[in-house]
Amino acid sequence: MRLRTHAVAKYSLFFSLSFAILNLLVSSAAAQSSGKEHPWMNASLSPDERASMVVKEMTLDEKISMLHGTGMAGLSPMSPSAIHSNGGAGYVPAISRLSIPAIQMSVAAYGVRNSGENGRYSTALPSDIAGAATWDMEGAYAYGALIGRELRAQGFNMSLGGGVNLTREPRNGRTFEYMGEDPVLAGKMVGSVMKGLQAQHVLGDIKHYALNDQESGRNAVNVNIDERAARESDLLAFEIALQESDAAAFMCSYNRVHGDYACENKHLLTDVLKKDWNFKGFVLSDWGAAHSAAKASAAGMDHEEPGWIFFGDELKKAVEAGTVSQAELDDHVHRILRAMFATGVIDDPPQKSVVDAMGGFEVARRIEEQAIVLLKNDGALLPLDASKVHSIVIIGPHADVGMISGGGSAQVDPPGGNAIMPPGKGQTRWLEPMWFPTSPLKSVRAKTAGSDVQFDSGADPAKAAALAKSADVTIVFAYQWESEGMDLPSLSLPENQDELIAKVAAANPHTVVVVESGGPVTMPWAGKVSAILEAWFAGSSGSDAVANVLFGVVNPSAKLPVTFPRSEADLPHPTIVQPPPESIPNYRNHDVWKQIAAGLAPFQVTYSEGVKVGYKWYDAEKKPVLFPFGYGLSYTTYSYSNLRVTTGKTPRVTFTVANTGNRAGAEVAEVYASLPASASEPPKRLV
Ligand code: BGC
């Protein structure tokens, strides 16, 4: 719960408009024009009634056409109809005779992807894990709503975002795309993002279902975990996100779980998702994660992406031969149509327009300001008083021009290209770090008219330390890049930055470190610097948000959604299990998609720590940490009192939070519960 406080405790809760209510308000030109011949265009009928009416009218070929994408170089052959794609990752052609529009999908984890190559623009929000650090469901709703608006402005009606895999393995290269290590926080936050997104009449998806917690060997790895532990950790995050949002789709992941690929895993897709959780939407495969027709169909996969290796002719033949029943086929189609009616993408199709770039900067800044975690502030060095600080040295790779962003399919393209290249030269390329043109140097200078603000890249630590020595304050911008398609070799900062920070801190006792990372990093220098801010991958307005916190325009209020361990040796698994050569796809081969589709040799990863993800592990194993989950400082102070617990079926906890300092602030109040010892659970869990 996030509380905004003034001098004396005073708080308000924010409730988001339910997406269901918004759906009732939908009306459309499409519905009015074809209402007579297409009775399912009557928006007063339920999504299920409308979907059933359409399914009755469809031919077998039309049904099959809804169950697969139209291709992507490297992962499947291309269909000629892909020419009508809007330039996103996935495209399902319209069925015009039935007034069913195309599904235009774009990856949109922290903003709309591929905008650069399509000559468009998108806001980069702070990475998803930064969103989680706000603990602000209202902010998460705004996060999703902005993505939804920008998707529609660019002609898309489906988002591929909603990553909710737990930070079970913090070196996972996609940690920045997810919402931390706790299932309640991650589930609630991703659910709110989905609500905000779907309220814009865009199909939302939650991914990567499930236990896709490392990138190394993701197409082959077989995950082993005890069922109870899975249900109380990784799966619980998905369950809560679904309950919160009624998301249109779930994306089944690349990996295997207990021997079966996630996309043909009946237990995960049917028993858990569709039966236990009553999921009404559709399951689509991750790109190249499908491995069969009849088995996947029976297991509960509804749609194959990006091509039709299995859910094209092969599925059609299976239906004709009766190995896949008509009812099973109809259920897949029904789920997709139902989701389209329920989210309003049929009644209210997207209208292309110019993205509200300025509005996007504003939202991105506001969220980042709430996401920056103040980890250390010795001697109240922060906030800096611009009238008293006469000389500042900014140090760090590229801190003169930009801030780093998260890579892979989530990569949002910066305006003007990569900030560390000449304008226009920096295309987004797979596995190449992309710097956004949000300059810490400029933003700090803007706050300090009259002060001397100098910059050093830190390439030569001794030179940087010499410059830092005489400054009133030194601010080091450190980074650790993350991307899909790789895991981190360790949690250490790259490029010799640990040595740089240690040298600068030794030269100047007033050293502040701002960390740009997608997850926890190790900080061997933590005891030597005065202040530390975790800024995550900070998005389009990152440097202004950081400057606002540094200079006290904003009082930090974020709390860590992940534990920062002291070292990798304290993680449940000191190293990430690497795939043997036969489990790695050969991307130099044009037919690599065939190799992936056929299935790569499995290798085993066993999550023997079970439910003990993140803080539950460190608590249970009594391992001290650098900064715990839920931690974060403020420029003011709070007191907690009057704790009361009412027991019963729905226990209630009430308490008073008072702002005891002299600055307005916001406080995230966290409640943890413990089960009786007989439950053999970790000491505490966030409730
Ligand atoms: C990623 C998905 C993404 C898809 C489409 C895959 O590589 O794992 O998260 O949605 O690509 O780009």
Image (cartoon, rainbow, N blue to C red):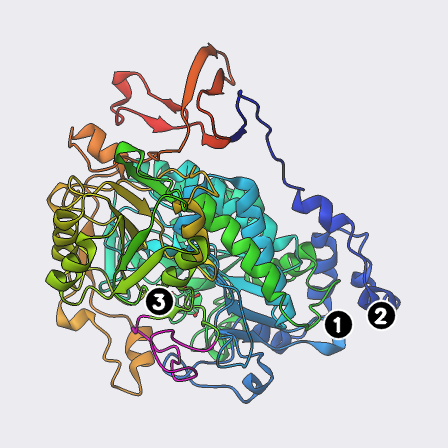
Give the mark nearest the N terminus, 1 or 2. 2
Q: What label sits on residue 99 in the rendered view?
A: 1
Quarter assignment of residue 446: bottom left
- Tell me the residue at 31%/25% (across/down): 684
Look at the image and give the residue range highlighted in magenta. Answer: 416-433
Residue 382: where, in percent of width, then height?
Answer: 34, 39
Residue under pointer 2:
34
> Pointer 1: residues within 10 angstroms few (<14), some, or many (20+)?
some
Image quadrant of ligand 1?
bottom left
Secondary structure mostly seen in the magenta stretch: loop
Q: What label sits on residue 18 in the rendered view?
A: none
- Distance (Cα) linking label 3 and label 1: 37 Å
Left or right, 521 with reference to 102: left
Residue at disc 3, secondary structure: loop
Residue under pointer 3:
407
Say what amino acid the circle numbered 1 marks: Ser
Left or right, 420 with reference to 296: left
